[in-house]
Amino acid sequence: MIQETNFEVIIVGGSYSGLSAAMSLGRSLRQVLVIDSGLPCNRQTPHSHNFITHDGEKPAVISAKAKIQVDFYDTVQFYNGLAISAVKTENGFEIKTESGKSFTSRKLLFATGVKDLLPEIPGFAECWGISVLYCPYCHGYEVKTEKTAIIANGEMGFEFAKLISNWTKDLSVLTNGKSTLSTEETLILQQHNIAVIEDEIDSFEHENGNIKNVVFKNQSKIAIKAIYARPPFEQHCLLPESLGCELTQQSLLKVDAMQKTNIAGIYASGDCTTQMRSVAIAVSTGSFAGAVINKELIDESFI
């Protein structure tokens, strides 16, 4: 049961980046509160990869182990709930939660991730993170050489196809409608035996999230083992924007090299700040943000 209401740092988001920052700050003897609603964006993904010492582990196992280790530090406390409002105060910030609890702090760190806006293709959501993939560095090795497709179009589709061709040569580009690839791009893809299919997608046939076939609206279908897609996304938490934090053109929280937003005292780390969405990078940016916040608090105490 949390007795205190005032902390040096509040971290909104208790997944990989938030927990990493909490450990860094807890070991720096800072009074820290982690507020987390328990809905990480990779909760459907069965295995995490490309994170040394945890390669192949279930994401939930990694975060559960991390929370146990962070909880060892009596300087860090956890609040399970949803942060619904944030305001600037004379001495820092105040966060209110859905249950009505309020907490204050001198510094804020948002490690809140993003919300993927999945297309309304039957089967897509069920396969997302299992056989419909975002990152080849996280999952490409496991489906190397398999019959693979990407859902993309235009210049982004061309660049995405080039990238994925590193892992498989049995590759198709599904433009889900008329291709906007240039003539030159189409020719280059053809030279690399990458098919461009313009049929509109109707649905995915799958078994427990493992895709079997892509069904098109003309009732044709192709057998596929893996699909890569980059659906649009939005910030999972709108509190940074309510405080005046700027977004990039890609709808990410804008931070500098020190993980600082444009609002003094507010930091951000993890998926909400970068298109390089992986557990390893989330942990790295969170740990770094924690160290930077601690240094800022030290500097302020010497003024």
Image (cartoon, rainbow, N blue to C red):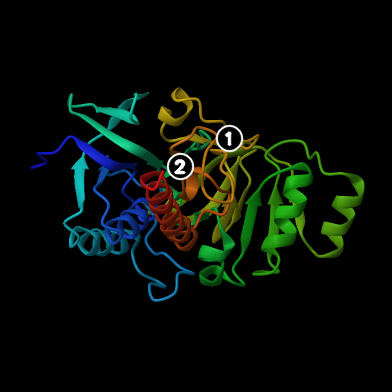
On the image, the x and y values in percent for residue 8 come to 29, 43
Quarter of the figure with residue 223:
bottom right
| Direction front: furthest residue | 303
* 47 up-or-down from 198: above or below: below
The residue lying toward the viewer, choosing from 67 and 218, is 67
| Direction right: furthest residue | 184
Q: Which mark is residue 251?
A: 1
On the image, the x and y values in percent for residue 7 come to 24, 40
Q: For the N terminus, which image quadrant?
A: top left
Q: Residue at x 77, y 60 (%)?
A: 194
On the image, the x and y values in percent for residue 246 come to 56, 31
Q: For the C terminus, which image quadrant?
A: top left
Amino acid type, callout 1:
Ser
Residue 164 as seen in the image, left or right of residue 13 = right
**Residue 160 visible, this angle:** yes
Task: Provide the residue designation for mark 2.
Answer: 267
Check disc 1: other Cα within 10 Å, few if <14, some if 14-19, many if 20+: some
The residue lying toward the viewer, choosing from 48 and 12, is 12
Q: Secondary structure at mark 1?
A: loop
Amino acid type, callout 2:
Tyr
- Specify which label sits upstream in the sequence, 1 or 2: 1
The answer for how far apart the CA atoms under marks 1 and 2 are is 16 Å
On the image, the x and y values in percent for residue 187 come to 89, 55
The residue lying toward the viewer, choosing from 237 and 78, is 78
The residue lying toward the viewer, choosing from 33 and 157, is 33
Depth check, mark 1 against mark 2: the one in front is 2
